[in-house]
Structure formats: C-alpha cells, structure tokens
Image (tube, rainbow, N blue to C red):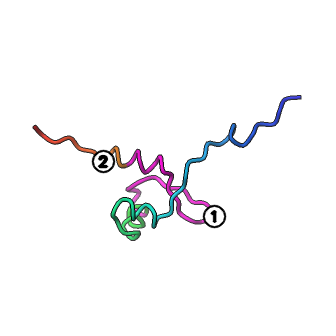
Amino acid sequence: MPRKPAVHDVVTLDELMTANDVADVLGLSTGTLANWRSLNMGPDYVKVGGRVRYRVSGINEWVARQEHKSAV
C-alpha cells in the first residue's frame, strides 16, 4: 500500500507576514499597501481566513525587482 504523502511533501509553506510587519520593514504605511493591493501593484499577497498575509519570499522577490541600475 503506498504511503500517504506527508504535509511537507504536498505544500511548501513560507513564513507569512502581516501587512503591519511588511509596512514596518519597507517603511510604508499599511494604507499604501492596501492601495497597492486594490490597484494590483506591490508585493504579492495571500488571504488566509480573510486576512491579508505576505510571504517573506514574495517580499524579497518584489524588492529585488524594484532595483534599478545607476547610469555611470
């Protein structure tokens, strides 16, 4: 009989942050994050039980995409 897959075999969870946490880290207001969500801008987010959460990896990826090279 095949074994039942363990939870970690099916889903890879990342640490989730609240909008308050993300706002603090990025130096933004929670209102700015809310506006960006309504405009489909800013970092990707998930809703868990109706509450907005951000994956740490998603925040890191979004910040990396904001990088611009300076003209020499």
Q: What label does residue 11 carry, if any?
A: none
| Quarter placement of the C terminus | top left
SS for dot 1: loop
Q: Nearer the viewer, residue 39 or 66?
A: 66
In this figure, which residue is indicated by the disc labeled 2? 66
Q: Of all residues shown, which one is farthest toward the left?
A: 72
| Quarter placement of the N terminus | top right
At a point 53% along the width and 59% down the height, the residue shown is: 53
Side of 71 relative to 66 (left or right): left
Side of 27 relative to 45 (left or right): left
Mark 2 is on which residue type? Gln
Label 1 Cα neighbours within 10 Å, binned few <14 / some 14-19 / many ≥20: few
Q: Nearer the viewer, residue 52 or 12?
A: 12
Side of 70 relative to 37 (left or right): left
Image position of 11 with respect to 40: above or below? above
Q: Where is residue 9 in the image (x, y as percent from the top left)?
A: 69, 37
Q: Position of residue 41 (x, y in %)?
A: 38, 56
Q: How many marks?
A: 2
Q: Where is residue 59 in the image (x, y as percent from the top left)?
A: 43, 51
In this figure, which residue is indicated by the disc labeled 1? 49
At a point 41% along the width and 69% down the height, the residue shown is: 30
Residue 41 is covered by the magenta coloring: yes
Q: What stretch is highlighted in magenta?
A: 38-62
At a point 33% along the width and 63% down the height, the residue shown is: 27
Image position of 55 with respect to 51: above or below? above
Mark 1 is on which residue type? Gly
* Mark sitting earlier along the chain (2/1): 1
At a point 50% along the width and 56% down the height, the residue shown is: 54
Residue 3 is covered by the magenta coloring: no
Image position of 4 with respect to 62: above or below? above
Rendered image quadrant of residue 49: bottom right
